[in-house]
Image (spheres, rainbow, N blue to C red):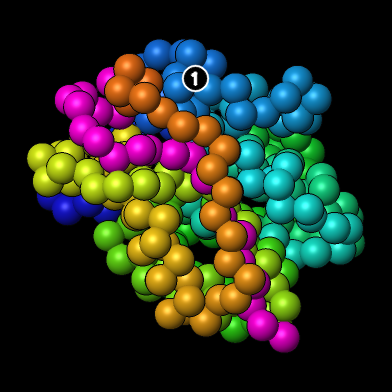
Amino acid sequence: MDVRDIVREKYGKLAQMALENRHGSCCGEGSCAEDAITGNLYDAAEAAEVPEAALLASLGCGNPTALASLEPGEVVLDLGSGGGVDVLLSAKRVGPTGYAYGLDMTDEMLALAEKNKAEAGTTNVKFLKGHIEDIPLPDASVDVIISNCVINLSSDKGQVLREAFRVLGPGGRFAVSDIVVDGKLPEEVRSDMEAYVGCIAGALSIDDYTVLLVAAGFTDITIEPTRRYDAVDLGQSCCTGGFDAKVLSAFIRAKKPM
């Protein structure tokens, strides 16, 4: 089974948990609020704007909607949209003249997202089935790309970034939350599929992320750490064992030139 199949299976199970009003985290059943990576990402006002099931299925590591400075009338695409929490929040930010797309490969997550969309009564949203390495949208069709702890799960991150660049219009913004590492993860962590699905093993270093963004054509790149995790945090969330690399959640910004 390859990484994509493992991710699909794991996240499909977590979507089903959310539909049954059970909590999930990056690596299993438990309270999202208590998870060091996925917990406490949305304030009370934001939580009140979306169905509870959307929050229960949130497996992110940040809050890209709050940090992307969305404007009314913009078109937003969320890569790996899961239960739809960031798509629904984005739709409210861009208003009725804007639009929000969510892209996910997992049937259960898409079903959950559609349920949450209906419950929220949101009309300026569309959820798409597909892979973030092959975005099913035309060139230059969106203004902002967001993502929440998903790009690290791809086995071809360079292709993800090239596709993001393609679908952004001139001057478009790339504004994602993701897991990055400052240092080197040991090979036993890199090869651990459970840790990979849990957000850690697939993470790029800050330097490698920057190199791939530049290679895709992006400019004005910044990588801003938002949370730092120690060994206890990571043992609770995604992987066990000690290592020297610093594991961080970060907000990653870049632009497509005009």
Does the magenta run of residues contain 241? yes
Dot 1, crowdedness within 10 Å: few (<14), some or many (≥20)?
A: many
Q: Residue at x 48, y 47 (%)?
A: 178
* Element carrying mark 1: helix
Q: Residue at x 61, y 29 (%)?
A: 41
Quarter the C terminus occupies: bottom right
131 on left or right of 96: left
x and y, in percent, of residue 66 in the image? 73, 42
The segment highlighted magenta reads 235-258
Q: Is residue 200 visible?
A: yes
Q: Which residue is mark 1?
A: 32
Q: Residue at x 77, y 44 (%)?
A: 122
x and y, in percent, of residue 3 in the image? 22, 51
In this view, 8 is above or below 157:
above
Q: Residue at x 40, y 13 (%)?
A: 30
In this view, 208 is above or below 136:
above
x and y, in percent, of residue 111 in the image? 51, 41
In this view, 10 is above or below 185:
above
69 vs 21, nearest the viewer: 69
Q: Is residue 142 visible?
A: no
82 vs 210, nearest the viewer: 210
Does the magenta run of residues contain 220? no
